[in-house]
Image: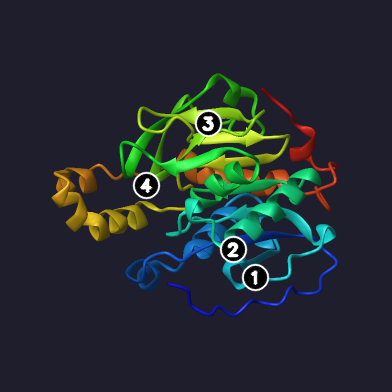
Amino acid sequence: MSHPIQASPVPASTAPALWIIKTGAAPAPLRAAHGDFEDWIAQGLRAGPGGSALQIRTLDARALPEWPAQDEIAGVVVTGSPAMVTDREAWSERTAQWLVRLMQGATPLLGICYGHQLLAHALGGEVAHHPAGLEIGSVAVQCLPAAAGDPLLGGLPREFAAHTVHEQSVRRLPAGAVPLAANAHEAHHAFRAGPCAWGVQFHPEFSQTVMQDYVRLFAPSLHRGGVDVQALHAAVAATPAANGLLARFASLTQGSGSGSGSGSASQSQAG
């Protein structure tokens, strides 16, 4: 169901900002208790050294906003969403086209869950429902060989815990994309496209408490599917390595200016 959404005007500013592109909202009970996707992402971006000085702006893609000019952008993070990329909604396809333009300008990008899938779709990959169904909870994710030298994932251990909740997946990566992380359920938990655009299927912005509340929210349908919800809830753990990716992404964007290739993220290539 579509609801009217008020677009926030793009503020006039001479300093490039980190832009959070909102593609949906967390479930109402979670928003009431913890805030929304953009709040968790902003907190993660600010978690590193100098994070309190970051300029962070949010735009809701569903409101068909005017996109910021290239020189107003230090980097972009695209949120998760309850929407489905395969629905090809007009706002989503419009956002996909903008992501391609940002890629062409070497703007640092990070897509999370829906954002990960949208980035892959925008670049010619394939998104579909996962044949094994929902992946939810704290899961083990393994870094692939190319991750070792990656500017964003290079500091992660070979295996790390991450929070997940998704029914759709990137079933085929775009041509030239570098796979960076996977697990037994999900072959494309992370990838890089070009020098400085990343997608992660897992949620680096989720806290342990948020993940526990997602499991509680999904409990009725999980029970019907034969899942031991009590065990799933008990297995929810802290995910410090995954959480740290947001601060690391923020650090990669600093000094990138208009995203024309002058920043550390756009100069670093691996794989």
Going from the N terminus, do you reach mark 2 or mark 1 first?
1
Is 170 above or below relative to 212?
A: above
Of residues 149 and 196, the one nearer the viewer is 196
Q: Amino acid at mark 4?
A: Glu
Horizontal side of residue 13 vs 270, given as left or right: right
Horizontal side of residue 228 vs 159, given as left or right: left
Going from the N terminus, do you reach mark 4 or mark 2 first?
2
Q: Amino acid at mark 3?
A: Leu
Q: Amino acid at mark 1?
A: Leu
Cα–Cα span, label 3 and label 2: 36 Å
Q: Secondary structure at mark 3?
A: loop
Question: Which label lies toward us, 2 or 1?
Answer: 2
Q: How many marks?
A: 4
Question: Which label lies toward us, 1 or 3?
Answer: 1
Residue in the picture at 46% in, 66% down: 25
Q: Amino acid at mark 2?
A: Ala
Going from the N terminus, do you reach mark 1 or mark 3 first?
1
Q: Residue furthest top?
A: 145
Q: Secondary structure at mark 4?
A: loop
| Callout 2 touching callout 1 (CB < 8 Å) | yes
Q: Locate the N terminus by quadrant.
A: bottom left
Of residues 202 and 99, the one nearer the viewer is 99
Q: Which residue is mark 1?
A: 64
Going from the N terminus, do you reach mark 3 or mark 2 first?
2
